[in-house]
Amino acid sequence: MTEIDVPFVSSSGLVVVKMLEMVKLKPNDVLFDLGCGDGRIIVEAAQSFGATSVGIEKRRDLAVAASGKAKELNLSRRIGVIVGDFYSFDMSRADVVVSYLLTVANKQLESKLEKELKLKARVVSHDFEFPDWKPTQFMMVNEGWLDHKIFLYVKENQEGFKRKDGEPELAWKSL
């Protein structure tokens, strides 16, 4: 598998909260953030929703920043940050996976997530689809001149996620 280089672009606070609300994050959930950057999603998940959060980040400087933020907020018991490649990381503990990766990177993750994620696991993606999966829900979040897309996918059965049959039927919701 060719590793796709994805630049670090942070999600806004509003988008982070909307993603976590969309997946109906609960205190007993384990959330994995693929390419966690500065850690804003894992911090919000632990701080506001009580979830256990794991950030996987290949850039050491960003992982150190995310880990430092967790320590600063006394959230180290609920947050773990791993410096590494999420393509080779075992995802089987995750109830929720967060992705702000390019569509080509999401495509490479599809079979891995289908194999490793448990039944009813939720995957939420900011702006970029998992191209072969049919979203369970779709939301547009407007921030002034910028619109953000949020896609939710749920592993409905052991075979994996719903497949697209032509155009996806989206449950449109706009804020």
Image (cartoon, helix red, strand yellow):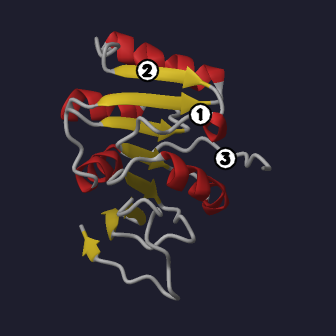
Question: In x, y percent, where is residue 14?
Answer: 30, 49
Q: Quadrant of the C terminus?
A: bottom left
The amino acid at mark 3 is: Val
- Under tag 1, what secondary structure? loop
Q: Residues within 10 Å of mark 1 (few under 14, many from 20)?
A: few
Q: Which mark is residue 163?
A: none
Residue 147 occupies which quadrant of the picture?
bottom left
Q: Which SS class for mark 3?
A: loop
Nearest to N terminus: mark 3 or mark 2? 3
* Residue 40 place in picture, x, y as percent: 39, 33
Spatial CA distance of label 3 from label 2 is 21 Å
Report the residue marked by disc 2: 80
Return the x and y of residue 124 as percentages of the image width and height.
40, 54
Neighbourhood count class around disc 2 (C-alpha, 10 Å): few under 14, some 14–19, many 20 upward: some
Q: Quadrant of residue 28?
A: top left
Q: Are marks 3 and 1 in contact (CB under 8 Å)?
A: no
Q: Residue at x 39, y 47 (%)?
A: 118
Judge whether 35 appears above or below 24 on screen.
above
72 vs 47: above or below: above
**Mark 3 highlights which residue?**
6
* Residue 54 in picture, x, y percent from top left: 43, 29
Label 1: which residue?
Answer: 89
Determine the CA span between mark 1 and mark 2: 14 Å
For the residue marked with disc 1, what is the amino acid? Phe
Q: Residue at x 50, y 70 (%)?
A: 133
